[in-house]
Image (cartoon, rainbow, N blue to C red):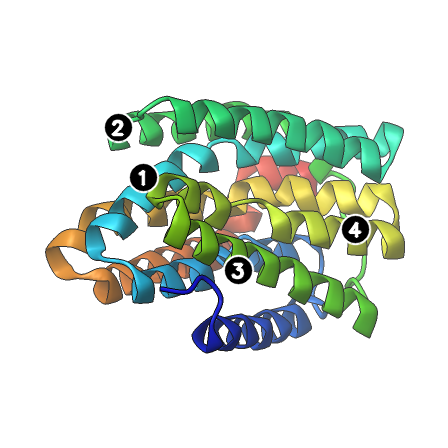
Amino acid sequence: MDVIDIGFAVKLASTAIFVLLATLIAERVGAFVGAMIVALPISAGPAYLFLALDQDAAFIAESARVSLGVNALVPPFLLIAAYVIRKAGLISALAAGFAVWGGGAVMVLATPLSLMVAVLLNIVSFIICLPLSRPLLAQPPSQALRRGYIDIIVRVIAVMAVVGTAIIVGRRLGPEVAGIAAVAPVVWTSLSVVVYARSGGAACSAIMAHGIGGMIGFAMALPAVALLAGPVGWPLAFIVALALCVAWSTGLTFARPYIPLYRIAK
């Protein structure tokens, strides 16, 4: 089977359309709601969908287990980048964040984590990072973030790169590497470039800090895929996972006025 074919090009094109629609929605809302939208599986969702069309259920379940372990590194990535960007700028922030994420991803790949251990790692990660993000939540941008066509193109290309990489490594290197590639924080990276250029470090820091809470939904979705892909098939597993992500982001948005963390920050 060829790694790159007509189907591969179609998958990337459909991903670009999906990301474009999501971006057009996100650009009209503020930091918190924008973070909730970006926390949805904008890149991981298409990556997993196209992996499922190429691979069997066991492959998808194994990839989801590895993705869950790597997902525990996203809150530290966001927290570190959110703090550093206020002091040292975008490049230093992303370098620091990816140093943590990349080092952790290598450890996850080298260590066969069980699903339960991966769940516990995520719980610990969010418990530590959420309180530490509180000082950064107090300064969200006061208005919606406005982006231009170049910004949209940057995000579309970035997500297409993740999806393409996940498909290629899934075909050549197996479910573990595919699981890591599928959840690389490329959407957060491309968003940070856009927001930093448009609104500065404080706005970028705020939206990344808000994203930590939003990523809990994705942390709940991955175990669902790992557990359900085999017994009930990947279509139903993906529907349940997406429903969990959407329900979490929506619920958190409506519950925000009643949550002490966000109430204090506001």
Q: Gap in Å between the C-alphas at discs 3 and 1?
A: 20 Å
Q: Residue at point 46% right, 55% down?
A: 168
Residue 255 is situated, as x and y percent measured from the top left of the image, at 49, 51
Packing grade of label 3 (10 A; few <14, some 14-19, many >=20) is many
Residue 61 is situated, as x and y percent measured from the top left of the image, at 25, 47
The label number, if any, that marks residue 193 in the structure image: 4
Q: Gap in Å between the C-alphas at discs 2 and 1?
A: 8 Å
Quarter of the image with the C terminus in it: top right
Q: Amino acid at mark 2?
A: Ser
Seen as rendered, the residue at the extreme left is: 231
The label number, if any, that marks residue 241 in the structure image: none
Q: Gap in Å between the C-alphas at discs 4 and 3?
A: 21 Å
The label number, if any, that marks residue 65 in the structure image: 1
Residue 173 is situated, as x and y percent measured from the top left of the image, at 40, 44
> Residue tagged by mark 3?
164
CB under 8 Å between callouts 2 and 1?
Answer: yes
Q: Is residue 147 visible?
A: no
